[in-house]
Amino acid sequence: MILAAMGTLNARALALVPVVAGGVMVAASSDTDNEPATAAAGAARLAGREPAATAASPVQALAPSLPASLPVAGPLASLQLTSFDPDFALMAQRTLDLVAAHQAAAANDPETGPMSALLIDPVALDGVRKPCLTEQSPAVVIDLDPEGATFVPPTGPTPLPEHAATLASLREAGIIIGWISQNSISVTGAVRNALEQSGLDPQGQDVLLLIAQDDQRKQSLRESFARSACIVAIAGDERADFDERFRYLRDPSVGAKLETLIGEGPWFLSAIFSPPPPAPGRPLHDHD
């Protein structure tokens, strides 16, 4: 399903969704909707516990480095703004480096695509990643949901210039940006407005990855997006933003190989927003 940035929602949800700049991708009813549950259960067993399509443009001139530091903006209306996170800048620079390296290597070996930030096996904890198709354009996925909560789109958000400049470097390199949230597609307009007004997506050209049905997970959104673009990096403020199997690891040591993917890439612990303090008697609940 492709939705205009501020358009009305189509009542139908399609199983495979082409992606265009400024569109919305939703996880729809299909055989793949059971994959996250299978992966989670399988990961639990292994841990010994109970049980785009075409992108907007190909990679063109790559930005050699991130822009210079800009003043940090003030807090947003509904969420607290984190100070500019160096890990967010690291994510962007690593992504630029990866894409530049692949572009150079493709001249000698055009049949080999870059590696995805998604794991190849829905069950294993070995950290082995999927290969991307050579024709897929590179993309990064940024999780909007603060840890333990769902993103609340602020009204009249304060601009975030440092984040905006960093994201602009990615777009200039032809890298697709996907914003993912547990939010329903019913709040597409509010999410789009928040991204535009904060300067994170001023032209409304990025892809939104939102939930179409109550029983769907962000894992299925990531998997669906990966069919249309090569997700080379994921940024989120908790490990389950990278892969939902982290939610089932009672013993962190069994996920040691997954930990090697965090920090230097392709997974980056970074937050643009932090959740507001919970109201008395209203603790924040986990999701996904």
Image (cartoon, helix red, strand yellow):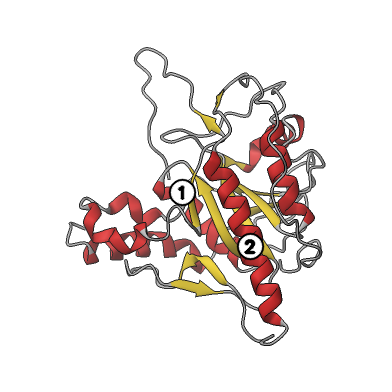
Give me the disc on residue 127: none
Q: In the figure, 139 relative to 287: above or below?
A: below
The residue shown at (56%, 58%) is: 233
Q: Specify whether residue 171 is in view.
A: yes
Is 37 on the left or on the right of 106, as rendered?
Answer: left
Disc 2/disc 1 C-alpha distance (Å): 23 Å
Is 177 on the left or on the right of 51, as rendered?
Answer: right
Residue highlighted by disc 1: 241
Percent across and percent down for residue 48 are: 17, 62
The residue shown at (70%, 76%) is: 104
The residue shown at (28%, 60%) is: 256
Residue highlighted by disc 2: 97
Quarter of the image for residue 101 reads: bottom right
Q: Which amino acid does label 1 sit on?
A: Asp
Q: Which amino acid does label 2 sit on?
A: Asp
Q: Which of 273 and 217 is in front in this view?
A: 273
Crowd around label 1: few <14 · some 14–19 · many ≥20 (10 Å): many
Q: Which of 6 and 139 is in front in this view?
A: 139
Q: Which of marks 2 and 1 is nearer the N terminus?
A: 2
Which of discs 2 and 1 lies nearer the camera? The answer is 2
Percent across and percent down for residue 215 are: 46, 49
Q: In the figure, 249 relative to 125: above or below?
A: above
